[in-house]
Amino acid sequence: MAQQFNFLLLSCLSVIVVASSFFHVSSARSGLRHNILDSEQPIKNPNDPTVVGIATFAVNEHNKESKSNFQLVRVMAGGTDVIPDGTVYQLEISASESNVITTRLVAVLVHPDNAKELLSFE
């Protein structure tokens, strides 16, 4: 009887953990869309070479990780947030793959030493 109770308790806890992780991922994705429009500092010039370079980095990193072949078309909008680890650039970009242009939301962390880290590409 005690073993059945422990198994039931463990099963319930497992379901809660899995469900909460799905909720966290979903809210993080929807949060990226919201944060681009509500960033601490909106990007005034999406054609700025620094911003375009960060967007290009995001596309290239995503291509390496997913073995895809996106090409940056342009940066449409974005914003930045300063955090203890550096500056997070949240960008809305147009990217093409196989002659199909889609809008993508990307987030890149630029560390103080200028090292870049792709946080999100969706």
Image: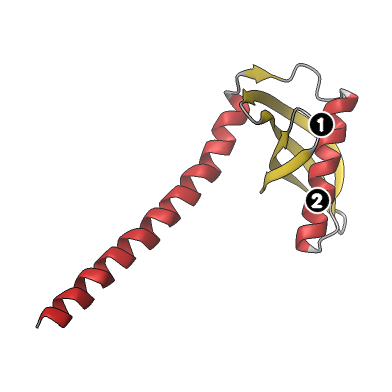
Residue at the (85%, 49%) spot, across then down: 60
Judging by the rendered image, the residue that carries numbered circle 1 is: 114
- 8 relative position to 100: left or right: left
Residue at the (86%, 32%) spot, across then down: 52
| Element carrying mark 2 | helix
Asked if 18 appears above or below 87 in the picture, the reply is below
Q: How is the image coloured?
A: secondary structure
Residue 88: image x %, image y %? 67, 31
Q: Are marks 1 and 2 in contact (CB under 8 Å)?
A: no
Q: Amino acid at mark 1?
A: Asn
Disc 1 to disc 2, C-alpha distance = 16 Å
Q: Amino acid at mark 2?
A: Glu
Residue 116: image x %, image y %? 78, 39
| The label number, if any, that marks residue 93 in the structure image | none
| Element carrying mark 1 | loop
Residue 78: image x %, image y %? 70, 27
